[in-house]
Amino acid sequence: MMKSKLGIVSLGILVFLLGGVAGFVTNSLYREHINPPQNMFQPTDVIEGIARELNLDSGQKDQLKEIFRETTLEFQRLNEEFGPKYDILNKQYGPKYEELNRIYRPRFDSIRNRSDQKIRDILNPEQKKKFEDFLEKFKAATMQPPPTP
């Protein structure tokens, strides 16, 4: 009799612990699915990739890092400005990105175009050709609405 009570209590504790572990694992997987990592590529990875692809010298690489730093700050300021506006527009228009793009996209594109031009300015003619090819591939792969602020 005592053995069966101990067995039932042990089984109950085991089931409780397994339920807790299953809940923890399920919750972790759910959070990863709902909130995937925001930065799949780090700026240093992008800089290294561009530097390697274009065969930049150390001076050009330093200039590229500075261009990325400045551009990152500009995008941060844009997102700080548009963040509250985006929330309002998103509530008003929902998934209608056309209206959001009409307001946000010109500023986003302006920053990106200035950055691209600054990069062109530090390149030699052969590197410029490679950079233009890179931009064409990049733009074709990312023809989507800009990231939300």
Image (cartoon, rainbow, N blue to C red):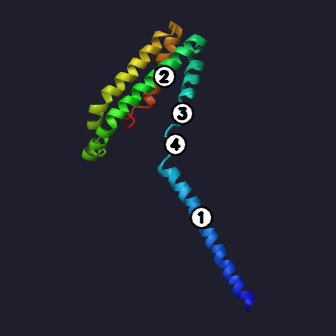
Q: Are marks 3 and 2 in contact (CB under 8 Å)?
A: no
**Residue under the point 59% across and 66% down:** 20
* Vertical order, 53 against 108 (above or below): above
Upstream in sequence: badge 1 or badge 4: 1
Callout 4 amino acid? Pro
Q: Is residue 132 visible?
A: yes
Q: Which residue is mark 2?
A: 68
Q: Residue furthest bottom?
A: 1
Residue 33, disc: none
Check disc 1: other Cα within 10 Å, few if <14, some if 14-19, many if 20+: few
Upstream in sequence: badge 3 or badge 2: 3
Q: Which residue is mark 1?
A: 22
Q: Which residue is mark 3?
A: 41
Cα distance in 3D space between marks 3 and 2: 13 Å
Q: Residue furthest top?
A: 125
Cα distance in 3D space between marks 4 and 2: 21 Å
Q: Quadrant of the N terminus?
A: bottom right
Q: Residue furthest right?
A: 3
**Residue under the point 59% across and 69% down:** 19
